[in-house]
Image: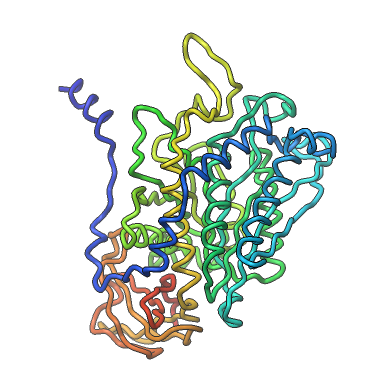
């Protein structure tokens, strides 16, 4: 009996897609977004990943002198190529992208033996509406790579999956979405220094915080190559999100201890939004929500954004093969080690890029979040009153709710263009949120209310 169970466990991966499809009314698909998703190209993604692998190593400590850049070796060459790629997309859209670098010298640290220049490369598709353009959604991947030794600056480190795949998602989203116009702003980011300690993303997220950027959502793609191992499921992409926010204040932690909310960080609302978008556009890679900051023993660039108080999630393939990550390219007893091109499933990367593009486009097309959402808790009562501030671009609002033990929103009640509503339901029994809807049905992220006494 035990043997049978073991076999079943290996061949039928456990997963839950929840009961979430019960939500009514469902957000409609936007035909323009649906058309854009068809333009995302597995061939383009393959060419980009092949190009990134061709630099031999993209270790953050590898060469970035002019001769190496010219020879096409090392992280400097990768950086210059990414920049030129973004510039070519901008050329194709009449200069619609602002291509920028965020470059700094990192001081020696654990995995950085000497002062090292680290450069993030990004492209900004500025929103067309002055008010909404202040809202930013961001997609990122890390273009640095590594092999078994985080200090090996010259050895081969192809990093085809980790993380040329994620870098190619940022690039391909930029190429396709720059052909469209959105009221909100989209940033396509590629960072370095991930493998040395999240250095690039930490610098970028701190800069965004210091400069007061209004980033609504960060999508971090890291290891989305769909490694071709027998237990891979190319129909699934995992979406990791923090529970209790890393940036929670002591007061927020106390409220969560008393009243719940450990499953309602802003990052988790992004994750739920991704899952919903996946259903709306019937993406071939289905988002599988993992209510966890990251995998065991691992971290990633979304954490840098979470630490600065931004909502950020991580996309990763369903089943990783650790022989193909952070390993020197070699064969041992007939087993091939190394993060090689041949293990990457380019159709899968394109499918993950479609989930990302649909999420970025829906958020950038949609209205701003309702502001200062509050729930009245002045007295004991079985009704619930919610109040908020009007958001730019909203034509109406809806209240969402779910059972406290349910992973995704189960009910939606359209309530028109108002900023206050009272429902004959007890706040003790469900979790509420409010979101904005524009004239054509795009939804904002859901906002869970603060208490108003
Ligand atoms: Zn990685």
Image quarter for residue 442? bottom left
Q: Is residue 238 visible?
A: yes
Give x and y (percent) for residue 170. 56, 52
Tell me: residue 273, above or below residue 341: below
Give x and y (percent) for residue 134. 61, 76
Depth order, front residue of 77/262: 77
For the view shown, which residue lies furthest in the left direction? Answer: 1
Give x and y (percent) for residue 116. 81, 41
Quadrant showing the C terminus: bottom left
* Residue under the point 54% across and 52% down: 172
* Residue under the point 72% across and 29% down: 151
186 relative to 425 in the view: left or right: right
* Residue under the point 58% across and 48% down: 141
Tell me: residue 238, above or below residue 376: above
The colour scheme used here is rainbow
Ligand 1 lies in which image quarter?
A: top right
* Residue under the point 46% across and 44% down: 42
Depth order, front residue of 36/282: 36
- Number of labelled discs? 0
Image quarter for residue 435? bottom left
Quadrant showing the N terminus: top left
Tell me: residue 9, above or below residue 441: above
145 relative to 407 in the view: left or right: right
Give x and y (percent) for residue 146. 64, 32
Q: Is residue 163 visible?
A: no
Tell me: residue 90, above or below residue 169: below
453 relative to 55 in the view: left or right: left
């Amino acid at each position: 009996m035990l043997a049978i169970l073991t076999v079943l466990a290996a061949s039928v991966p456990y997963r839950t897609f929840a009961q979430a499809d019960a939500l009514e009314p469902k957000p409609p698909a936007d035909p323009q977004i649906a058309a854009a998703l068809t333009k995302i190209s597995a061939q383009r993604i393959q060419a980009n990943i092949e190009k990134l692998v061709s630099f031999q190593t993209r270790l953050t400590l590898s060469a970035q002198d002019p001769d190496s850049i010219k020879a096409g070796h090392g992280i400097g060459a990768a950086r210059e190529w990414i920049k030129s790629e973004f510039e070519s997309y901008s050329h194709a859209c009449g200069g619609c992208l602002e291509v920028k670098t965020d470059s700094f010298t990192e001081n020696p640290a654990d995995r950085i033996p000497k002062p090292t220049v680290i450069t993030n490369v990004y492209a900004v598709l500025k929103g067309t509406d002055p008010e909404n353009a202040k809202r930013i959604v961001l997609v990122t991947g890390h273009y640095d790579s590594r092999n078994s030794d985080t200090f090996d600056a010259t050895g081969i480190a192809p990093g085809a999956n980790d993380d040329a795949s994620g870098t190619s998602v940022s690039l391909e989203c930029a190429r396709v979405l720059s052909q469209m116009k959105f009221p909100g702003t989209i940033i396509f980011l590629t960072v370095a220094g991930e493998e040395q300690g999240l250095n690039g993303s930490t610098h970028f997220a701190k800069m965004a915080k210091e400069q007061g950027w209004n980033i609504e959502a960060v999508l971090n793609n890291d290891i989305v190559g769909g490694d071709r191992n027998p237990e891979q499921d190319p129909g699934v992409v995992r979406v990791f999100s923090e529970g209790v926010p890393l940036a929670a204040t002591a007061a927020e932690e106390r409220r969560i201890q008393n009243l719940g909310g450990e499953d309602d960080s802003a990052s988790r609302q992004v994750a739920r939004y991704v899952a919903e978008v996946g259903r709306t556009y019937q993406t071939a890679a289905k988002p599988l929500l993992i209510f966890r900051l990251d995998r065991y023993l691992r971290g990633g660039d979304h954490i840098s954004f979470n630490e600065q108080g931004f909502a950020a999630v991580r996309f990763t393939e369903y089943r990783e093969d650790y022989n193909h990550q952070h390993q020197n390219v070699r064969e041992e007893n007939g087993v091939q080690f190394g993060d090689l091109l041949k293990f990457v499933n380019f159709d899968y990367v394109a499918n993950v890029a479609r989930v990302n593009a649909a999420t970025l486009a829906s958020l950038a097309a949609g209205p701003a979040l309702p502001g200062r959402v509050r729930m009245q808790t002045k007295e004991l009562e079985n009704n619930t009153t919610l109040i908020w501030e009007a958001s730019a671009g909203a034509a109406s609002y809806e209240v969402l709710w779910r059972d406290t033990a349910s992973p995704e929103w189960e009910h939606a009640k359209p309530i028109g263009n108002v900023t206050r509503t009272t429902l004959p339901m007890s706040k003790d029994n469900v979790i509420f949120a409010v979101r904005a809807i524009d004239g054509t049905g795009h939804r904002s992220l859901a906002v869970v209310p603060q208490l108003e006494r």
